[in-house]
Image (cartoon, rainbow, N blue to C red):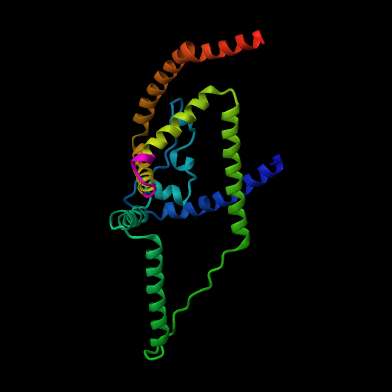
Amino acid sequence: MTGHEYMSMDKVAGKIAGGFSSSSSSSSSGSDDDTPSHSKSLKPNVYRLFGREKPLHQVLGAGKPADVLLWRNKRISGSVFGCATALWVLFELLDYHLITLICHILILTLITLFLWSHVSNFIDKPPPNIPDAVFPDKCVLEVASIVRYKMNQALGRLRHIAFGSDVKSFLAVVCGLWILSVIGSCFNFLTLVYIVFVLLHTVLVMYEKYEDKVDSFSEKAITELKKQYVEFDKKVLSKIHKGKLKEKKKD
């Protein structure tokens, strides 16, 4: 993929993200009056988790998804959370199936519209006016291009880690995949997705509320982890590099 293609993909992604951002200003201002304002700026010279320099709402895109995750509008966020919980209960606890649910919804919708369109002649009411739903070609192609671009980025990153010399990134990815495999063996896919969904709707808003305390604690924890990594590098990784150098000299 050429540099020009990467720039064009970034522009397309920026346009779609910009649509969310432009619509978020009205949704944020139209939120409930009892929702506190979170437009405060970050304190200077204070450590922030992952080195962020912007408020959490802006890091998440400052759009409608960020408003939902951070509970800017409690009614909308509560509705999304309730719908996700209801779907999880249907599929996981009540052993409902996705195809069965879709078919039942379509049957109920078709019966309702059919009866409404025929009964409207007797009750002097117009039949339902349902607009044509059409996916524009441009939107579908833009989404497909962004997905392809992100997948190529991820594959390139994995290839760089696998064949590169960045041992720190290699160990982090391997440990992350191993932890994910352990978690995945304890839950099925639907439950795992629901757990991630719940964490996104709870951890982020709690972090935003107590970010100063969390950032202070994380700074101490990361400093301690760096110390441990330095010791591990001296005792283990440096010996591996020395062994490779000796083998090359012998050759």
Seen at 44% across and 13% down, the residue is: 231
Residue 72 placement (x, y as % from top left): 38, 49
- The x and y percentages for residue 232 are 45, 15
Residue at far bottom of view: 122
Number of marks in the image? 0
Up-down relation of residue 144 to residue 108 (above or below):
above
Residue 164 vs 97, above or below: the answer is above
User: Quick check: 207 above or below 23?
Assistant: above
* Magenta span main SS: helix
The question of residue 186 being in magenta is answered with yes
In the rendered structure, the answer to whether residue 204 lies left or right of residue 137 reads: left
Residue 10 at x, y percent in the picture: 62, 44
249 sits left or right of 203 in the view: right
- Could you say which is closer to the camera, residue 137 or residue 15? 137
Residue that appears at 57% across and 64% down: 135
> Residue 90's quadrant in the figure?
bottom left
| Residue at image location 39% in from the left, 42% down from the top | 38
Q: Residue 57, how many percent across, how many down?
A: 44, 42
- Range covered by the magenta-colored residues: 184-190
Between 97 and 62, the residue placed more toward the observer is: 97
Tell me what residue is drawn at x 64 percent, y 46 percent: 9
As drawn, the residue found furthest toward the left would be: 93
Report the quarter where the C terminus lies: top right
Considering the image in quadrants, where does the N terminus appear?
Answer: top right
In magenta segment, residue 141: no
